[in-house]
């Protein structure tokens, strides 16, 4: 078939298509060249030549450390007294407001005292009568004794007079005791606070008849208070061993000190003192009961409140402690990374002990003096070259060097983007695409070619060719 366009025009179109195919073939070969051959070797050499990773370290220095632990507990008043009536009668008046703090000796209630006052008066009269009888018996005894000395009366009369005197003395003592009992009952009509504390709701209203033993209210002492908590069996044994080793079970204030932790996590200002440790283990719970006494001047600890008690279980000397961030899980082992003598990261298997304030206690694996790595553990592998950061400034400098060593792409790409933003589409767009395609990394195969600006730059070249091909199509 005869083509309407001349032969040289067809040769230009075919040559342009061949050039574009060569460009894409070079780009695809650059993307896949990292697997084998020279490209793979260059990638391995680049990986081996990576600079050391900057890391932060913690130098292990053996020292004495306290092993502390926290246990849940409840606050209760040191003394809780149930105020009860001691006599029977009508409750006349209440002198306090429910829920307020009363001082020891303050008047709480009064019970109708009139019946008891009458009994007291009666007992006083009986005492007076007994004393009068005693005086009469003493006078009779005086006369009979003088008559007996002159043989004026018999011995039987003398003995009767002496018995009357002794009986009169016993009657006086009995009357005095009855008066004391009546006065005690009269005193019970005034109910006073037995201790300083906070009162509960009233149990009996005014005007009610109360009897001996009727509960009127409850008073709870708020200063000091007690905190009851329990230790597991193993912790209790460890604590007893530590106290025995120190040889100061009753004099070591640090051993018996307790820090009270409030529900919001704050520490209570006053420290507690453990004043009681149960000598037996509860077979049902497997715990040992402890009690701490805490000064509660501002009434910050209310009885019944949930708190935590922190106490010292033991003190380790020459202990090795590492920060918590340094501990990681390796291949079926707990490990830390240290900086070896060759400047490379080395994984060391460790056996961890209890938690302490500075981190975790290391039972075995470290002896002291090691530089434990505490940063970048997610990217760190055994044998990797590391560089210890001397200060924050070096850390920033190292980050810049590391970014610069990643390749020329990070430095050249912003320049290329700036240039493309300022430049206008031209006939040299195809050459620009070839240069960027040759700089592609294996992980981003056609990222630069797929950008909209690449199509924009090459569109003028393709527009002429497409128009030419369209004309050819219409001609055919």
Image (cartoon, grey):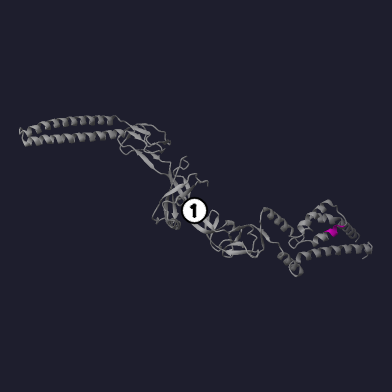
What secondary structure is the magenta-colored segment mainly?
A: helix
In this rendering, position of residue 424 left or right of residue 371? right
Could you tell me which residue is drawn at 55 percent across and 54 percent down? 358
Q: Residue at x 52, y 56 (%)?
A: 64
Residues drawn in magenta: 428-432
Q: Depth check: give the residue in front, 169 or 443.
A: 169
Residue that badge 1 annotates? 69
Residue 245 in percent (x, y) is at 44, 58
* Secondary-structure class at tag 1: strand
Can you say whether 151 is above or below 376 in the image? above
Residue 431 in magenta? yes
Query: What is the residue that sits farthest to the front in this orientation?
Result: 150
Q: Quadrant of the N terminus?
A: bottom right
Q: Where, quadrant-wise, is the C terminus in this rendering?
A: bottom right
Pick the front one: 78 or 456: 78
Residue 254: image x %, image y %? 47, 51
């Amino acid at each position: 078939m005869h083509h309407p366009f001349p032969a040289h025009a067809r040769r230009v179109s075919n040559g342009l298509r061949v050039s574009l195919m060569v460009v894409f073939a070079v780009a695809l070969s650059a993307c896949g060249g990292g697997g084998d051959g020279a490209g793979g070797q260059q990638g391995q050499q680049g990986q081996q030549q990576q600079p050391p990773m900057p890391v932060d370290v913690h130098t292990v220095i053996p020292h004495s450390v306290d092993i502390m632990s926290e246990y849940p507990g409840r606050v209760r008043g040191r003394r809780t007294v149930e105020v009860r009536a001691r006599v029977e009668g009508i409750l006349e008046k209440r002198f306090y407001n429910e829920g307020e703090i009363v001082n020891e000796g303050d008047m709480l209630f009064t019970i109708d005292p009139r019946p008891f006052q009458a009994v007291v008066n009666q007992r006083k009269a009986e005492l007076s009568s007994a004393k009068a009888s005693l005086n009469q018996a003493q006078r009779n005894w005086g006369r009979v004794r003088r008559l007996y000395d002159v043989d004026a009366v018999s011995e039987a009369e003398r003995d009767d007079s002496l018995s009357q005197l002794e009986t009169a003395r016993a009657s006086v003592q009995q009357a005095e005791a009855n008066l004391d009992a009546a006065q005690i009952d009269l005193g019970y009509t005034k109910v006073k606070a037995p201790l300083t504390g906070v009162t509960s709701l009233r149990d009996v209203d005014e005007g009610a008849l109360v009897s001996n033993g009727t509960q009127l209210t409850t008073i709870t002492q708020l200063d000091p208070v007690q905190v009851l908590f329990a230790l597991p069996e193993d912790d209790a044994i460890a604590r007893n061993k530590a106290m025995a080793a120190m040889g100061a079970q009753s004099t070591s204030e640090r051993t018996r000190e307790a820090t009270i932790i409030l529900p919001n996590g704050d520490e209570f200002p006053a420290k507690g003192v453990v004043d009681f440790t149960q000598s037996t283990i509860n077979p049902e719970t497997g715990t040992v009961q402890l009690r701490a006494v805490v000064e509660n001047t501002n009434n910050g600890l209310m009885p019944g409140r949930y708190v935590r008690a922190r106490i010292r279980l033991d003190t380790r000397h020459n202990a090795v402690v590492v920060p918590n961030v340094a501990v990681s899980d390796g291949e079926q082992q707990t490990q830390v990374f240290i900086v070896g003598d060759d400047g490379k990261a080395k994984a060391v298997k460790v056996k961890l002990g209890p938690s302490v304030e500075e981190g975790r206690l290391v039972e075995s694996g470290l002896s002291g003096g090691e530089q434990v790595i505490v940063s970048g553990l997610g990217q760190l592998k055994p044998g990797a070259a590391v560089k210890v950061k001397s200060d924050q400034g070096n850390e920033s400098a190292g980050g810049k060097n590391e970014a610069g060593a990643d390749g020329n792409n990070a430095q050249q790409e912003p320049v290329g983007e700036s240039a493309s933003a300022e430049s206008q589409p031209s006939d040299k767009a195809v050459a620009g695409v070839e240069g960027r395609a040759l700089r592609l990394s294996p992980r981003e195969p056609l990222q630069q070619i797929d950008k909209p600006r690449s199509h924009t730059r090459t569109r003028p070249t393709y527009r002429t060719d497409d128009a030419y091909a369209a004309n050819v199509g219409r001609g055919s």
